[in-house]
Amino acid sequence: NNGVPNTSIDIMKKSIMPKEKIDENKDDNHEKKTEDSNKSENDHYISVLLSAQEHTKCYPYMDANGFVNQLYNAWDALCNQNVESLRLARRKVMIMKADPKADPDALIVAENTRNEKADACTKSNICFYKIRALKSVCDQQEKEKQEKGNEGNESKNKTSE
């Protein structure tokens, strides 16, 4: 238990997890709506995680290291999801460019989608970089605490002998 209410963590997980996988076989109208919703969903996920980061200032009794680890895992999942969707968007553009019969308008839409996915990757990776740096500091502090604890135990053992 890291001091964060479990209901808060469950709500955060549910709001971040994707509801469906990317389907490459959708018609163009549905695909355009999905592109807009994916862009807003990514912005929503980022705002949820940034909002969750603000909780570290609200709960002084909370295990900050545990919370940072949870945030790290959430950002990692979001970045992996964005990288995968970018990979699929790039693949789709590449396939469309190789097809001489491809509709030029559909190619433009696919290229725009690819660019939006690249922007989403960039945004999430920048935020993830901040959490990785914070996690690195927390891990270093935890390691130093353990070393001091071990040194204290060794000195107690030597004095009792």
Image (cartoon, rainbow, N blue to C red):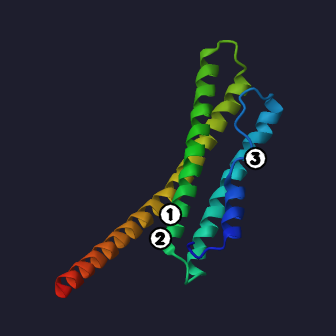
Identify the image quadrant of the N terminus. Answer: bottom right
Q: Is residue 59 above or below residue 33?
A: below
Q: Is residue 113 above or below residue 37?
A: above
Are the two marked residues, 1 and 2, in contact with CB atoms closer than 8 angstroms? yes
Report the residue at 63% width, 43% height from top: 116
Looking at the rendered image, the disc whose residue lies closer to the viewer, 1 or 3, is 1
- For disc 2, the marked residue is 65
Q: Could you tell me residue 60's position as x and y percent?
A: 55, 84
Q: Could you tell me residue 69's position as x and y percent?
A: 50, 63
The one nearer the camera, 148 or 83, is: 148
Q: Is residue 88 above or below residue 43?
A: above
Amino acid at pointer 1: Asn
Which of marks 3 and 1 precedes in the sequence?
3
- For disc 3, the marked residue is 37
Amino acid at pointer 3: Ser
Mark 3 closeness class: few <14, some 14–19, many ≥20 residues within 10 Å: few
The one nearer the camera, 132 or 27, is: 132
Are the two marked residues, 1 and 3, in contact with CB atoms closer than 8 angstroms? no
Which of marks 2 and 3 precedes in the sequence?
3
The one nearer the camera, 74 or 46, is: 74
Looking at the rendered image, the disc whose residue lies closer to the viewer, 3 or 2, is 2
* Element at label 2: helix
Q: Could you tell me residue 10's position as x and y percent?
A: 69, 63
* Element at label 1: helix
- For disc 1, the marked residue is 69
Amino acid at pointer 2: Asn
Report the residue at 55% width, 62% height from top: 71
Are the two marked residues, 3 and 2, in contact with CB atoms closer than 8 angstroms? no
